[in-house]
Every structure is written in structure tokens, then in C-alpha cells.
Image (cartoon, grey):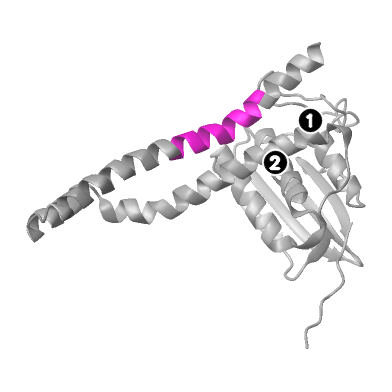
Amino acid sequence: MASLGRLVAGVAHELNNPISFVYGNIHTLIRYRAAIGAYLDAIHGKGRASDLAALKKSLRIDDVLEDFGPLIEGTMEGAVRISEIVKNLRRLSFSKLGEVERVNIERLINTAVLWAVRTKQVRIDLQMELEPELWISGNEGQLHQVIVNLVENAIDAMRGTESPRLVVSAARRGNEILFRISDNGPGIDKDHISHIFEPFFTTKRVGEGTGLGLWISYGIVREHGGELLATNEPEGGATFSFALQAAPTVHFE
């Protein structure tokens, strides 16, 4: 029952983040709708050009229109995040891999890291070391979730670090692609490092984590033919890494 309680509290917390993001965006869109509606009413009322120009400025119509794109994209990202969380809950039995596709690693990591950093809303020294033209065959949505989870955990681990630094890299190693997510936080406690991939294991307080993120990530990587590893760096901090088979190069004539 204690494990179930931690699970429920953690899932509620993880769902609350993207839901709050979507909720806030919707409220902003409602305000924008009112502003655009007032401006259109004035236009259709055939107001004077000078009055319309002043109204447009006071309602910040240009700023509103410019902000629509990021708001919609952010709302979509939040909806996708919620969908991924629900999918992961269904993955507790580690079902089949799912749809396999050709995945562009540079795009995958850039998208996942951007989402994770934006969600945490913290300032960090982010270093991306990505070789170009890296491809694997796998499920892009599931791999996205792995990167998001590892980056979010790294950011949480650096909470309290004076100058937090996150290094995300992907490089070819023979016939494999090696992924590494490294932070300069306090590292992983030696008593915890052998348990971090166990279901329900978490060092976070109740409501801050489900204890499922690393377990599910471990399962996803395993289903893709790799192994998720965690190590402490000699100079401090921790690194999570895994290697996946590179996809064959596609030649076009």
C-alpha cells in the first residue's frame, strides 16, 4: 500500500506539471481572444483609422498575433507530455516495443532537452555535443521520454549546485550510437546506485516523483537493444549512458 501511495502521489505530480502548462496557456489564449474580438468589433463598426490604430496599440494586437505560435506549440507539447505519461503507465508490464521508425538523433535530443529544460524553468549551463547525421531504428516517442526523464533527473540532482552544468552528447562508436547525459551535481549515493532502476525506488519526496521514471527508461532502452547505465564521475556529478545500434546509412540516387 505504501508503494501504491507513492505511485499515485507521484503520477499526480507528473501529470500536474504539463496540465498546469496547458491550463496557463489556455487562460492566455482566452485573454487574447477577447482582445482580438474587441479589435474586430471596432473594425466592423467602421471606426476611424486613427482610433483603430490607437486601439490596436492599446490591445497589443501585434504582440498577441506573434505570441499565438509559441502558445499553440507549447500547449501541444503539454498535451503530448500528458499522452506520454499515460502511455508509460500502460507500460508497467513492459509490453511490446511498438511502432519502429527511422529516428534522427539530433532532432530527437534537441526536442527532448528543450522540453525538459523548459518544464523545469531553471538556468543551467547546457552543453550539447551531437554528431550530425546519426540515425537509429526505434520508437521515437519512447526514446523522447527516456531523454526527457534523464535530463529532468539531472536538473533535479543539481538543485543547490552553485553553477549547474548539463552535458548531453551523442556520438558514433563503431556500429552503435552512444548517448550520455552528465551533470555536475553531488552524484549518486553509493547505497542507492544499485537500486535506482528498481520500480518505485526514488530519493525524491512524496509528490515529487513516482519512482517509475528510471525503471521505465531502463525498460525502453532494453527493448531497443541497449542497457541504461549510471556512474559517478571522478570529478563529481553523475552520468547516465546507453548505446543503441546505428541504423544503416540510406543512399539516394
Relative to residue 16, is residue 209 drawn left or right? right
Residue 244 placed where, x, y %?
A: 87, 57
Magenta: main secondary structure = helix
Where, quadrant-wise, is the C terminus in this rendering?
A: bottom right
**Residue 4 in magenta?**
no
Distance between mark 2 and mark 1 Cα atoms: 13 Å
| Residue at the image point whose x is 76% and y is 24% from the top | 203
Report the residue at 19% width, 53% height from top. 56
Q: Is residue 162 visible?
A: yes
Give the number of callouts: 2
Residue 170 coordinates in the image, percent (x, y):
77, 59
**What stretch of residues is rendered in magenta?**
12-25
Which label belongs to residue 212?
A: 1
Q: Which residue is mark 2?
A: 84
* Residue 33: percent from left, percent from top: 32, 44
Please identify the quadrant where the N terminus is shown.
top right
SS for dot 2: helix
Picture coordinates of residue 243, whole percent (x, y): 87, 55
> Which of the two discs, 2 and 1, labels the residue nearer the N terminus?
2
**Residue 195 sits in which quadrant?**
top right
